[in-house]
């Protein structure tokens, strides 16, 4: 599956990053900043967003097909820039594609537990993440002695997908999610969904300067760098790498959002589901 392995040319191939929608762009921007010479491919499965309310089995099926698609495009490393997909599928992906280096995500409960002064942490993540075994294991391992308050912030992913990051509707929803946590004495908030860093400026205004907000994206970019180094896969190119995005939804929409949120430009194309596989539709010839 994927391009034949050639240790000479593999470092020149792209890093691939995927999410259910625009959320993974909050990770992609840190990868770009830390690894400017890498070629990047981004896949947003926007026809199926939100993943957070789907079954774990369904998300596993999507994630496996997306991985095959990204490998066909030559990906040398895959970042699952989605807490929900990582929770549902990362173990399965590592078993199914044992030669592929994967970087996954999980809510940053460990650093939050280390930083909280009052021993109270709030986690904002999707319902899918909260019901995953990966999250359960994370809590058992790192949240001992700390009180954790969870909110699935229902509807927030959809608002962000519609391009809203500081609207009244977003503000209302954020207040409803975090004010009860603050009333309980939470002093540290974990952004456990990659969509949420896009509403961080508004969230910071709501919670004020005394609350620590943790976005794991910079750490994920560092982990990506470490993994590339470990596998001898760093791109030796001297000039900035190209970036190409695919969406199973509306390419113009994704392009508009990316244009607003990223400091670099990306071509955006469409990918379509055919049965349980993702394909790039053949280009129409117009002459
Ligand atoms: N961005 C994804 C995450 O990190 C999930 C959003 C969704 O529900 O699709 O969990």
Image (spheres, helix red, strand yellow):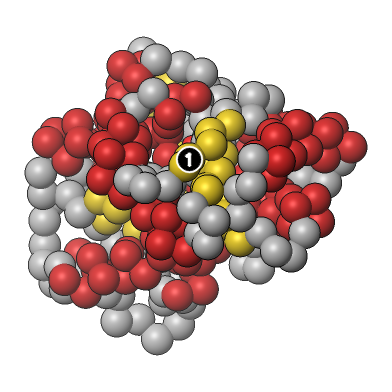
Is residue 7 placed above or below 200 in the rendered structure?
A: below
Is the residue marked 1 within 8 Å of ligand 1, measured from its CB?
no
Locate residue 89, reporting x and y percent: 28, 31
The residue singled out by tag 1 in the image is 148
Is 225 situated left or right of 115 in this image? left
Please tell me in which quadrant of the rendered image residue 9 appears: bottom left
Measuring 77% from the left and 59% from the top, which residue is drawn there? 208
- Residue 278 location (% of width, % of height): 38, 27
Q: Is residue 138 left or right of residue 266?
A: left
Q: Quadrant of residue 82?
A: top left
* Viewer can see residue 161: no
Q: Looking at the image, is 40 positioned above or below residue 168?
A: below
Q: Residue at x 61, y 55 (%)?
A: 187
Percent x, y for residue 200?
A: 69, 54
Residue 98, by quadrant, is top left
97 sits to left or right of 252 = left
**Label 1 Cα neighbours within 10 Å, binned few <14 / some 14-19 / many ≥20:** many
Q: Nearer the viewer, residue 127 or 2?
A: 127
Q: Is residue 157 above or below residue 205?
A: above
Residue 62 position within the rendered picture, expressed as x and y whole percent measured from the top left: 36, 25
Circle 1 SS class: strand
């Amino acid at each position: 599956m994927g391009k034949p392995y050639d240790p000479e040319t593999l470092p020149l191939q792209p890093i691939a990053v995927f999410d259910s929608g625009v959320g993974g762009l909050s990770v992609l921007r840190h990868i770009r900043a830390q690894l400017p010479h890498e070629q990047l491919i981004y896949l947003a499965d926007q026809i199926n967003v939100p993943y957070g309310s789907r079954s774990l089995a369904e998300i596993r099926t999507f994630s496996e097909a997306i991985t095959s698609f990204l490998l066909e495009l030559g990906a040398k490393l895959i970042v699952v820039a989605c807490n929900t997909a990582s929770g549902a599928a990362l173990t399965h992906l590592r078993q199914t594609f044992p030669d592929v280096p994967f970087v996954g995500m999980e809510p940053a409960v460990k650093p939050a537990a280390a930083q909280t002064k009052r021993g109270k942490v709030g986690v904002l993540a999707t319902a899918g993440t909260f019901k995953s075994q990966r999250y359960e294991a994370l809590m058992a391992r790192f949240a001992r002695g700390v009180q954790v308050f969870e909110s699935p912030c229902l509807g927030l992913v959809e608002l962000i997908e519609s391009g809203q990051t500081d609207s009244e509707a977003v503000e209302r929803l954020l207040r409803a999610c975090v004010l009860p946590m603050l009333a309980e004495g939470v002093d540290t908030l974990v952004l456990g969904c990659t969509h949420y860093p896009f509403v961080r400026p508004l969230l910071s205004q709501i919670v004020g300067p005394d609350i620590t907000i943790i976005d794991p994206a910079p750490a994920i970019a560092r982990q990506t760098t470490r993994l590339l180094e470990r596998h001898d896969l760093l791109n030796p190119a001297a000039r900035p790498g190209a970036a190409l995005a695919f969406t199973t939804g509306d390419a113009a929409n994704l392009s508009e959002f990316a244009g607003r949120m990223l400091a670099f430009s990306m071509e955006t194309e469409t990918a379509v589901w055919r049965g349980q596989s993702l394909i790039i539709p053949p280009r129409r010839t117009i002459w």
